[in-house]
Image: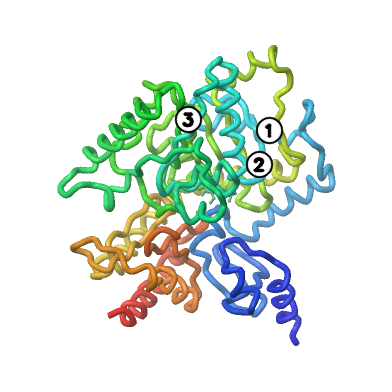
């Protein structure tokens, strides 16, 4: 047996992989791909194969793979101080510097940063902050959290409840009843015939208003949403959505949590997604692009409105009793500082806008007119091609045909990683922000060839 086969055998015998068919994988069915190295927008497998990563890992390797500058910053920090906790006022220069930067660059009027290790735990922190805030304000009933259908906010108990797709809940006793879901602003699927984007956005806002009224405004603590819907379909909001939604939240004294885990740090062409849509959040969730995934780190950024209550409440409750061993880890802070330097210095938000726009345009030209393509959409360095069985009737394929999965498998065979998004037959693209027009051309050529192959099989 080769060394590579041994690795795969050990893995199949011992690892419970996320989002993988547990029984088939353990029995040797399906691929086990051993990733060995990465550089720029490409990864290389231990079998010598090379793939263009059209999804930046999981929309997280924003500065690209193999950046020595990041490795050196992490190494320097390890040699100086690999770890100390941030409880009881302990800090490092890297952490204080990062926090000062985040508070200044984040949307809204931000004041403090609480650190974790994943987007899920940061959203867990946000929920606890909402409850803490309303308890301290003497509003103990104002606890429900509204998120959106098809929103994705993580997989822990509360963040998994916020996630608005049932297959993340099934057999896991989720969602918890304290979380409710509202409609999503996806014009293609949600609008009535002839309804403009603006009218549809206003309807969504009116529905949200009615939902809060029905729940009882004194029971609704927060609304959480991604500026651009990510895992639920890579869907930019319908025009005017955020302008219509925010007054409703203000009217009912409902906090707004912007989940910037995907959009943050340049992916949609602005420092944060909120900047693009004039969103003024009370709380901001970040992860992924914060460290470009070189080291796990997440941040719950806390606006003045919540901070002032937390600060004043300390006289009554004492210490803020929430934290993780690894909150504010020095290696995460060192990696984040250098990744943010790179994003700024190389204008990766600008590149996301320019090259992402080019990628979208080329995808439209290559496959936009196919009978089985319902919508090609995107913003910044996010793009999606959604496939439908009937374009005129807007009818989805039978899920058993697994059209999205077949397309992404075909692209993979041809050397490109795309993601078959979990809701519908959608090929998703979220490459590293360092993508060049030449890389985009390669991606589009593979996508076109893959679509041609799968369309032939289907028709
Ligand atoms: N929020 C959003 C918008 C995400 O896209 C994700 C992950 O994809 C999360 C939260 C959860 O992050 P993590 O997987 O790091 O827990």
- The residue indicated by pointer 2 is 337
Q: Which residue is mark 3?
A: 222
Q: From this view, report whether residue 189 is shown above or below residue 368.
A: above
User: Which tag, 1 or 2, sits closer to the chain's start?
Assistant: 1
Figure quadrant of residue 184: top left
Is residue 304 in view? no
Q: Residues within 10 Å of mark 2 (few under 14, many from 20)?
A: many
Dot 1: few (<14), some (14–19), or many (≥20) neighbours within 10 Å? few
Nearest to the observer: residue 375 or residue 205: 205
Viewer-proximal residue, 114 or 254?
Answer: 254
Q: Ligand 1 closer than 8 Å to the CB at disc 3?
A: no
Q: Which label is found at residue 349?
A: none
Q: Residue at x 58, y 20 (%)?
A: 135
Counting other residues with Cα less than 10 Å from the Cα at mark 3, is it few (<14), some (14-19), or many (20 or more)? Answer: many
Circle 2: element type: helix
Q: Which residue is mark 1?
A: 97
């Amino acid at each position: 047996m080769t060394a590579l086969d041994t690795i795969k055998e050990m893995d199949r015998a011992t690892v419970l992989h996320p989002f993988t068919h547990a029984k088939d994988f353990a029995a040797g069915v399906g691929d086990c791909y051993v990733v060995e190295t990465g550089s720029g927008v490409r990864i290389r497998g231990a079998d010598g194969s090379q793939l263009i990563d059209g999804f930046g890992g999981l929309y997280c390797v924003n500065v690209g793979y193999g950046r020595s500058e990041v490795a050196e910053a992490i190494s320097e920090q390890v040699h100086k101080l690999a770890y100390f906790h941030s409880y009881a006022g302990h800090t490092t220069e890297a952490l204080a510097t990062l926090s000062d930067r985040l508070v200044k660059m984040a949307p809204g009027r931000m004041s403090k940063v609480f650190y974790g290790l994943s987007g899920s735990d940061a959203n867990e922190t946000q929920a606890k902050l909402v409850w803490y805030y309303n308890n301290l304000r003497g509003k103990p009933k104002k606890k429900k959290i509204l998120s959106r259908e098809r929103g994705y906010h993580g997989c822990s108990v509360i963040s998994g409840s916020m996630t608005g797709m049932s297959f993340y809940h099934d057999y896991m006793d989720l969602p918890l009843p304290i979380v409710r879901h509202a409609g999503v602003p996806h014009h293609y699927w949600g609008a009535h015939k002839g309804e403009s984007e603006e009218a549809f956005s206003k309807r969504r806002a009116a529905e949200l208003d009615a939902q809060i009224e029905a729940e009882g405004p004194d029971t609704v603590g927060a609304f959480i949403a991604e500026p651009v819907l990510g895992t639920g379909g890579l869907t930019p909001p319908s025009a005017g959505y955020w302008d219509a939604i925010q007054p409703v939240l203000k009217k009912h004294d409902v906090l707004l949590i912007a989940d910037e885990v995907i959009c943050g740090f340049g992916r949609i062409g602005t420092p944060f997604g909120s900047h693009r849509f004039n969103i003024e959040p009370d709380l901001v969730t970040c992860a992924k692009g914060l460290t470009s995934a070189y080291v796990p780190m997440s941040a719950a950024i806390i606006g003045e409105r919540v901070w002032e209550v937390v600060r004043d409440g300390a006289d009554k409750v004492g210490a803020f009793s929430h934290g993780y061993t690894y909150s504010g880890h020095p290696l995460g802070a060192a990696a984040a500082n250098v990744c943010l330097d790179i994003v700024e210095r190389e204008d990766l938000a600008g590149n996301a806008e320019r090259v992402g726009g080019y990628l979208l345009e080329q995808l439209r030209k290559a496959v936009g007119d196919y009978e089985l393509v319902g919508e090609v959409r995107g913003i910044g360095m996010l793009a999606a091609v959604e496939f439908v069985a009937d374009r005129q009737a807007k009818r989805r394929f039978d899920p058993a045909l697994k059209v999205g999965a077949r397309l992404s498998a075909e692209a993979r065979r041809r050397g490109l990683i795309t993601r078959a998004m979990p809701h519908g037959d959608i090929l998703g693209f979220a490459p590293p922000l360092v993508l060049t027009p030449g890389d985009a051309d390669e991606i589009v050529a593979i996508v076109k060839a893959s679509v041609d192959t799968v369309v032939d099989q289907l028709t």
